[in-house]
Image (spheres, grey):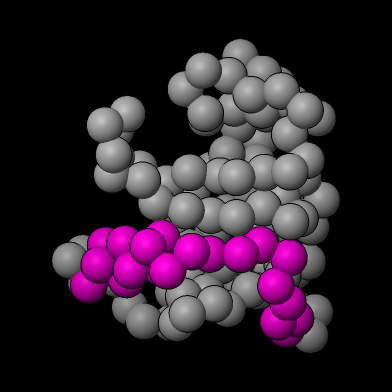
Amino acid sequence: MNELQIQSEIKITEKASREIRRIMDENKIPADFGLRVGVKGGGCSGLTYTLGFDGEIKDGDTVIENDGVKLFVDGKSLFYLSGTELDFSDGLNGKGFVFNNPNASKTCGCGESFGV
């Protein structure tokens, strides 16, 4: 495995960190797990965001620690997510994680996919 990298290309808001920790506690997810953040092809704008808890750091991953939360991001996804802020919204338009991505040249109405 490559040497562990701690960087901050993706920012996590305090509200998102709080929600990630709440989900981990509620679901008894071990503290050494991280939130795997990525992108994959699909969605109405070409790329879609992925989120899921993972206990394994893979070769080529970047680990980002912020406010007690670890994000695991593969190299390809980091290219598209660099500079992104992960937030959590519980407003009138629904409840969920929000990606504020400066690299997205277009997004769909639901906010779950983007194009570059």
For the question of whether residue 103 can be seen, the reply is yes
Over which residues does the magenta segment extend?
4-25
User: As drawn, is 28 to the left or to the right of 114?
Assistant: left
For the question of whether residue 42 can be seen, the reply is no
If the image is split into quadrants, where does the N terminus sit? bottom right
Q: Seen from this angle, which residue lies furthest top?
A: 44
Quarter of the image where one finds residue 27: bottom left
Q: Point out residue 96 in the picture as x, y percentages from the top left corner.
A: 35, 42
Give the residue drawn at x 33%, y 68%. Answer: 18
Quarter of the image where one finds residue 106: top right
Give the residue drawn at x 48%, y 43%. Answer: 98
- Magenta-drawn stretch contains 29: no
Give the residue drawn at x 74%, y 56%. Answer: 83
Quarter of the image where one finds residue 36: bottom right
51 vs 20: above or below:
above
Give the residue drawn at x 57%, y 39%. Answer: 49
93 vs 12: above or below:
above
If the image is split into quadrants, where does the C terminus sit? top right
Q: Point out residue 82 in the picture as x, y percentages from the top left corner.
A: 76, 55
User: As drawn, is 84 to the left or to the right of 13?
Assistant: right
Q: Point out residue 86 in the picture as x, y percentages from the top left corner.
A: 53, 54
User: As drawn, is 102 to the left or to the right of 11?
Assistant: right
Q: Seen from this angle, which residue lies furthest front?
A: 92
Q: Nearer the viewer, residue 35 or 111?
A: 111
Q: Nearer the viewer, residue 93 or 72?
A: 93
